[in-house]
Image: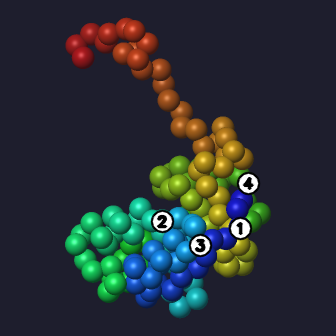
């Protein structure tokens, strides 16, 4: 688990959040609305969620760039369970909470997830030099 990232208000503009990310040298922030964590936003999310649509990033609230459902796990959950929940939702990150308050993050790239994160993949014949009939 890494420490919780910087939090920004959901009403902050995409431009303001991008400036915070640049100034702090980070690529991920927590988005908070009315004191509650509503999601995590990366620099890529800002581009895809607002800039790519042609919207004015100075006027678009960062909340519009929050992708999908936030995955949360409690600090006392087993790492394998956290990895399973992240995999089920195709999430790269999960917010770690204590009594509903974010205290850190688990990232899919975290070595602790190791074998629990790797998807089960069956051998693919065409990748092993065999041609599948009818394919």
Mark 3 Cα-neighbour bin, 10 Å: few <14, some 14–19, many ≥20: few
Distance Cα–Cα, label 2 vs label 4: 26 Å
Front-lying residue, 44 or 82: 44
Give the mark, 2 or 4, whose residue is nearer the N terminus.
2
CA gap between label 1 and label 4 equals 18 Å
Marks 2/4 in contact by CB < 8 Å: the verdict is no
Viewer-closest of 24 and 125: 24
Q: Is residue 12 above or below residue 107?
A: below
Whole-percent x, y for residue 37 in the image: 56, 79
Q: Which of marks 1 and 3 is nearer the N terminus?
A: 1
Q: Residue 24 has which mark? A: 3
Return the mark for residue 76.
Answer: none
Q: How crowded is mark 4: few (under 14 residues within 10 Å), some or many (20 or more)?
A: few
Q: Name the residue carrying label 4.
A: 78
Taking 76 as reference, is 81 left or right?
A: left
Residue furthest bottom in the image: 34
Tags 3 and 4 in contact by the CB under 8 Å rule? no
Residue drawn where x is 54% and y is 37% of the image: 119
Q: Mark 2 points at which residue?
A: 42
* Disc 1: which residue: 3
Location of the N terminus (image quadrant): bottom right
User: Closer to the observer: label 3 or label 4?
Assistant: 3
Foreground residue among 119 and 57: 57
| Marks 2 and 1, the one that precedes in the sequence | 1
Mark 1 crowd level (few <14, some 14–19, many ≥20, 10 Å Cα) = few
For the point 65% across and 58% down, which residue is it? 106
């Amino acid at each position: 688990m890494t420490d919780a990232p910087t939090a920004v208000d959901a009403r902050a503009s995409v431009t303001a959040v991008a400036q915070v990310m640049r100034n702090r040298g980070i690529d991920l922030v927590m988005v908070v609305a009315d004191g509650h964590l509503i999601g995590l936003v990366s620099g890529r999310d800002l581009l895809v969620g607002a800039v790519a649509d042609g919207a004015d990033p100075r006027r678009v609230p960062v909340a519009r760039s929050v992708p999908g459902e936030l995955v949360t796990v409690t600090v006392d959950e087993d790492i394998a369970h956290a990895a399973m929940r992240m995999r089920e939702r195709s999430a790269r990150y999960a917010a770690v909470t204590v009594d509903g308050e974010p205290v850190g993050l688990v990232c899919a790239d975290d070595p602790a997830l190791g074998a629990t994160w790797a998807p089960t993949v069956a051998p693919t014949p065409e990748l092993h030099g065999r041609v599948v009939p009818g394919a």
